[in-house]
């Protein structure tokens, strides 16, 4: 590709929105796996396990879910207390259905791709009554896959 070709926006938010819609349309519960160490991630510290957090983004678990091209935002209950959650799109590692584990490990952005802006909204997800059960972290050099860990 030549240097004078127009730059396109990131495809990650489009994949995330499409997969969440697909999971919802099939009557399942969409969850996202987030790298909590990415700058700008705002989740309750008690929800983080080994630097990652699994968030339930089902409509029944969150209030005001917004997935734009830079951020995911909503309000969710953690331990019975409503708290805002903000996640830069670049921090989302995977999206999958809790019931089946079907979904996708999101691909890394290519070098030179646009990075999320620094603005934040007050939105966010997790069903605190369910323990995090997410896909394993992808291993570099191996083909990504998802499985349910119970």
Image: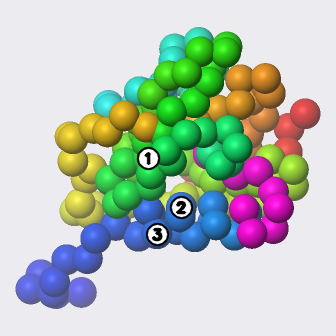
**Which residue is found at the position 19% from the left and 77% from the top?**
7
In the rendered image, which quarter contains the C terminus? top right
In the rendered image, which quarter contains the N terminus? bottom left
Query: Is residue 119 shown left or right of residue 31?
Result: left
**Which residue is found at the position 73% from the left and 39% from the top?**
134
Check if mark 2's residue and mark 1's residue have beta carbons within 8 Å: yes
Which SS class for mark 2? Answer: helix
Q: Image height check: is 32 above or below 143? A: above
Residue with the mark numbered 1: 72
Which of the two labelled residues, at mark 2 and mark 1, occupies the earlier sequence position?
A: 2
User: Is-magenta flag for residue 26?
Assistant: yes
One can see residue 136 in this view: no
Check if mark 3's residue and mark 2's residue have beta carbons within 8 Å: yes
Which SS class for mark 1? Answer: strand
Image location (x, y in percent) of residue 67: 44, 55
Query: Is residue 6 shown left or right of residue 146?
Result: left
Q: Nearer the viewer, residue 133 or 126?
A: 126
The quarter of the picture where residue 20 lies is: bottom right
**Which residue is found at the position 67% from the left and 38% from the top?**
61
Residue with the mark numbered 2: 16
Query: Is residue 125 shown left or right of residue 143?
Result: left
What crowding class fits label 1: few (fewer than 14 Cα within 10 Å), some (14-19), or many (20 or more)? Answer: many
**Colouring scheme, one of rainbow, by chain, secondary structure, one colour:** rainbow
Image location (x, y in percent) of residue 130: 80, 27
Residue with the mark numbered 3: 14
Q: CA distance from mark 3 to mark 1?
A: 12 Å
Which SS class for mark 3? Answer: helix
Image location (x, y in percent) of residue 55: 62, 37
**Which residue is found at the position 51% from the left and 47% from the top?**
65
The quarter of the picture where residue 73 lies is: top left
Q: Which residues are magenta?
A: 24-34
């Amino acid at each position: 590709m030549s240097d004078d070709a127009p730059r396109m926006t990131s495809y990650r938010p489009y994949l995330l929105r499409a997969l969440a819609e697909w999971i919802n349309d099939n009557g399942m519960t969409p969850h996202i796996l987030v790298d909590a160490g990415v700058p700008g991630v705002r989740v309750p510290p008690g929800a983080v396990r080994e630097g990652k957090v699994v968030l339930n983004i089902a409509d029944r678990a969150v209030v005001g879910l917004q997935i734009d091209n830079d951020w995911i935002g909503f309000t969710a209950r953690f331990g019975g207390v409503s708290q805002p959650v903000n996640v830069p799109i670049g921090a989302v590692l995977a999206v999958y259905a809790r019931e089946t584990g079907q979904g996708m490990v999101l691909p890394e952005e290519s070098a030179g791709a646009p990075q999320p802006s620094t603005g934040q909204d007050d939105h966010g997800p997790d069903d605190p009554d369910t323990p995090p059960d997410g896909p394993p972290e992808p291993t570099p050099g191996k083909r990504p896959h998802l499985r349910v860990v119970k």
